[in-house]
Image (cartoon, helix red, strand yellow):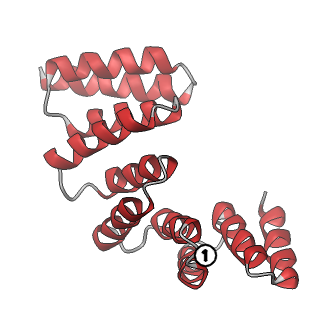
Amino acid sequence: NQNHAEAHNGLGLAFKKQGRMEEAKAAIEHALKLRPEFPEAIYNLGSISYLQGQFQTAAEQLRQAILLKPNYADAHVYLGHALLEQKDYANAIECYQRAIALKPDSAAAYSMLGVAFRSQGKLEDAEKMAKEALRLQPDFVEAYITLGTIHNLQRRTDATVQVLQNALLLR
């Protein structure tokens, strides 16, 4: 029953928020037994795998969610995270760019695209993405931290201090 699948998926999300990952996983897997082609549940399973440090498994699950729902921007973002953790920077960048194409106001996608560019040593591109994330969401602490890290790598100490002090004011 589709409603039961939704309920099990919702229960899994509630368990996830409580940090009860094994129970979350079991509830979501039950949702998928009831409705195997349920992209949101597959995405949630992928996010749990990611949080448990199972980045390859997460990437596989997130790819499956994207196959079922190609315009699922959040799944593209999370897949980018999983690929970034595996140091697959080129594919992570593609995921974040796809997420931005689908959801142009995604500060998280811009910020993480900045992280991916930084990981490749493309500091100017990284800086542009972090600044765009902050333009979209001025209180986005992680984007300030990303920008501060980029300024530090650029040996721009004054800019690093200013940006990281802004981040601390938001916490």
Q: Quadrant of the N terminus?
A: top left
Amino acid type at circle 1 is: Leu
Viewer-side residue, 155 vs 99 = 155
- Relative to 157, say whether 33 is above or below: above
Residue 137 horizontal/vertical position (percent): 57, 71
Circle count: 1
Viewer-side residue, 123 vs 29 = 123
> Is 93 left, or right, of 61 in this rendering?
right
x 51%, y 47%: residue: 85
> Is 58 left, or right, of 125 in this rendering?
left
- Relative to 106, say whether 163 is above or below: below
- Relative to 65, say whether 30 is above or below: above
Quarter of the view holding residue 33:
top left
Residue 90 horizontal/vertical position (percent): 39, 65
x 59%, y 75%: residue: 130
> Is 144 left, or right, of 86 in this rendering?
right
- Relative to 20, say whether 128 is above or below: below
Residue at the disc numbered 1: 134
Identify the element where label 1 is drawn. Answer: helix
Q: Residues within 10 Å of mark 1 (few under 14, many from 20)?
A: many
Residue 117 horizontal/vertical position (percent): 52, 71
Q: Quadrant of the C terminus?
A: bottom right
Viewer-side residue, 64 vs 83 = 83
Residue 113 horizontal/vertical position (percent): 48, 68
x 21%, y 59%: residue: 71
